[in-house]
Image: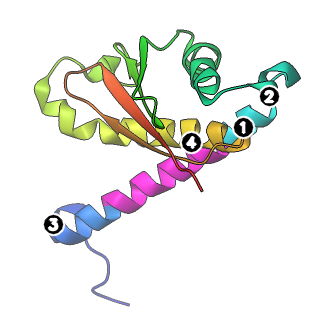
């Protein structure tokens, strides 16, 4: 199979972009599995949340402290199934916050955490879509959209 091996710099931009999307998908999948495991190990009393908002509050406080040793900075909702969780000093982004050139690299550091949130919510019986965005390092926002059947 000669000719199939190429250095990263020789790859076409489209192929590199596809590989990056696949890598992000793998990271998100790993985070999902970790989130499921965390969700399964929650104390029994936390599994009796009455409302969706209570579950999101739990993620912002208890889960975030367990994983990152700090609480999420804010939680907002439109009361229609969309929540925005903001961390003003996200631990995975702190070291790269010295330059604007790193903002485009930030998604690599957020894919795992998006999966972590989605996996935990899944274990708690909530199907969701979780995305992340970065406007200024080291702050980031996670948008959680609840998927209703």
- Dividing the image into 4 quarters, which one contains the N terminus? bottom left
Among the 4 quarters of the image, the one containing residue 124: top right
- Mark toward the start of the polypeptide (2 vs 3): 3
Q: Position of residue 149 (x, y in %)?
A: 60, 57
> Residue at (20%, 22%) from the top-left corner?
136
Judging by the rendered image, the residue that carries numbered circle 2 is: 47
> Residue at (64%, 43%) from the top-left corner?
126
Q: Is residue 9 left or right of residue 76?
A: left
Q: Are marks 3 and 4 in contact (CB under 8 Å)?
A: no
Q: Position of residue 49 (x, y in %)?
A: 74, 25
Q: Nearer the viewer, residue 76 or 18?
A: 76
Judging by the rendered image, the residue that carries numbered circle 1 is: 124
**Which circle, 1 or 3, is nearer the viewer?**
1
Q: Which residues are magenta?
A: 20-34
Q: Which mark is residue 21?
A: none
Q: Is residue 126 left or right of residue 82?
A: right
Among the 4 quarters of the image, the one containing residue 121: top right
């Amino acid at each position: 199979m000669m000719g199939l091996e190429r250095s990263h710099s020789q790859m076409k931009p489209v192929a590199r972009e596809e590989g990056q999307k696949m890598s992000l998908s793998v990271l998100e999948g790993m985070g999902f599995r970790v989130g499921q495991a965390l969700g399964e190990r929650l104390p029994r009393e936390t599994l009796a949340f009455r409302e969706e908002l209570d579950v999101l509050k739990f993620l912002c406080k208890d889960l975030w402290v367990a994983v990152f040793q700090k609480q999420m900075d804010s939680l907002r909702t439109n009361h229609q199934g969309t929540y925005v969780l903001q961390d003003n000093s996200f631990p995975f982004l702190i070291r790269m916050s010295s330059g604007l050139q790193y903002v485009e690299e930030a998604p690599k550091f957020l894919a795992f955490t998006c999966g972590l949130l989605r996996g935990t919510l899944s274990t708690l019986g909530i199907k969701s879509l979780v995305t992340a965005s970065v406007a200024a390092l080291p702050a980031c926002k996670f948008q959680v959209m609840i998927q209703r059947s």
